[in-house]
Image: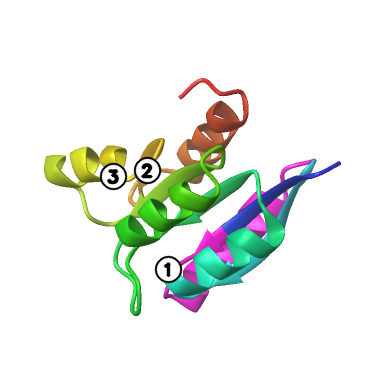
Amino acid sequence: MKTQILIADDHGATRRIVGELLKSHDGWEVCAAVENGQQALLKATEFRPDIIILDLAMPVMDGLQAAREIAKVLPSVSVLVYTLHDASWIEMEAKRAGVRRIISKTQSAEALISAVEQLLKKEV
C-alpha cells in the first residue's frame, strides 16, 4: 500500500514540482493536487491521505483555515505547511491549527522529503 499525499498550492508549477519530487520517492503517491484550502478539505475527506502538504497563502481558504477544518474531520492526518512565509507567529498559529511541521519553500527539496519521512515515522 502506497503512502497517499495530498498537495494544496495555488501555483500550478509548485504543485507539479512537489508532486514529481514526492512521486519519485518509492512508495509515495500523490492522491490529489489542488489549488486552495477548500478543495484540500474536500479531497482530504474523499481520499483520506496519510500526509497533507498545504501552502499558507491560497485563495478561497488559506492553509491555516484548511488545517483547522481538516483537523476537525481527520485528526490523525499529518499536515505539513510548505510556505514562503517565515515568521514566528505563523509557527504558533500553525501549531494551534493542528499543523505538525512547517517547511520553507526556500529550503532544499531534501528538507521537504525529510519532513515527510519524519511525519510518516511519527517523529514530529
Residue found 37% across the figure and 41% down from its top: 98
The magenta stretch spans which residues?
7-26
Distance from disc 3 to disc 2, alpha carbons, whole Å, reads 12 Å
Query: Label 1 is placed on what type of residue?
Result: Gly
Residue tagged by mark 1? 37
Residue tagged by mark 2? 103
Residue found 48% across the figure and 75% down from its top: 35
Residue 7 lies, with reference to residue 1, above or below; the image says: below
The answer to whether the residues at label 3 and label 1 have Cβ atoms under 8 Å apart is: no
Query: Label 2 is placed on what type of residue?
Result: Ile
Query: Which quarter of the figure has residue 6?
Result: bottom right
Residue tagged by mark 3? 94
Side of 26 relative to 101 (left or right): right
Residue nearest the viewer, comparing 37 with 84: 37
Q: Is residue 105 visible?
A: no
Residue, far right: 1
